[in-house]
Amino acid sequence: TSELEYQNPFTLLVAVVLSAQATDVGVNKATGPLFAVADSPDKMAALCEARDIRRLQVYSPTRANREAFATRMAARHGIEAVACDAPDQVYRGADIVAALTDAAQPVLDGALLEPGTHVINIGGGGLPDAATMARVDVYLRFGDAPPAEGLDPFEDEYLTWRAAREGDTSRPARRAHGVMLPGKRVTLADLVTGRSAGRTSGEQITWSERGNLQGAQFHAVAGHVYEAALAAGLGHDLPDEWFLQTIRN
């Protein structure tokens, strides 16, 4: 390990978040170039600073929603933003295709992906559609949560425990998808430390997901945020009775 490199309280928080998913040495390699162009919340929030996004193509089944979103993004980031009339239009010429949905089933269509596209999928059952998965060349998984003491490494999406009588199998556990595409998998730690090259061709289709980190990056900064809020006199004390009510379940 080594000391994290940072420039101000905000960049310290970012470095701590990243260190929850990689080594400190690897984090410092990544944050040097990052903090050179994005050392504040406003700069970090604008992906245009890091990815030079010039055009946004957005589709939502509700016309009013997609048009309002396109208008807001154009004003905020100074880019061309187009509300598409059909979902297939968002794939045309796109370097990044992001499916962000509360639908229970995948909304991506892998047959429409152009060479070199990076895929992001949030919602839609947790995974891209089968056609997308078949076309992925490199799969970036941010990492896996450390297992409980005494257990072998566990790469599924979550661990749960329940109280039951010995031998009770009336509610068998069901596995989530775990690590997909093992032959194409690259971890964030391998990427930032140089152990893996990641994408090796501009034609490759890539997909990234969080893995089963379960919000560990947020745990890592919670104490620092709490102490900073106390020092600044911000926030309100919450009474214990709010959390200790006796109610009928």
Image (cartoon, rainbow, N blue to C red):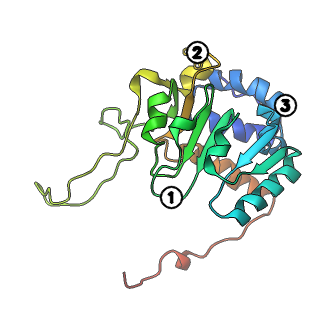
Q: Amino acid at mark 1?
A: Ala
Viewport quadrant of the N terminus: top right
Q: Quadrant of residue 26?
A: top right
Give 213 or 63, whichever is nearer the viewer: 63
- Callout 2: 10 Å neighbours few (<14), some, many (20+)? few
Could you say where residue 92 lies in the image, as x and y percent from the top left? 68, 37
Q: Which mark is residue 197?
A: 2
Relative to 218, residue 110 above or below: above
Q: CA distance from mark 2 to mark 1?
A: 34 Å
Q: Quadrant of residue 96?
A: top right
Q: Is residue 173 left or right of residue 227?
A: left
Q: Amino acid at mark 3?
A: Val
> Residue at 83% across / 41% down in the picture?
43
Image mark count: 3
Q: CA distance from mark 3 to mark 2?
A: 23 Å
Mark 1 lies on a secondary structure that is: loop
Residue at image mark 1: 103
Q: Is residue 130 left or right of residue 226?
A: left
Give 156 or 96, whichever is nearer the viewer: 96
Q: Is residue 156 left or right of residue 42?
A: left
Mark 2 lies on a secondary structure that is: loop
Instruction: Identify the mark nearer the N-term, 3 or 2.
Output: 3
Relative to 23, residue 77 above or below: below
Q: Is residue 132 left or right of residue 119?
A: left
Could you say where residue 54 lies in the image, as x and y percent from the top left? 82, 37
Could you say where residue 243 lies in the image, as x and y percent from the top left? 51, 74
Contact flag, marks 2 and 1 (Cβ < 8 Å):
no
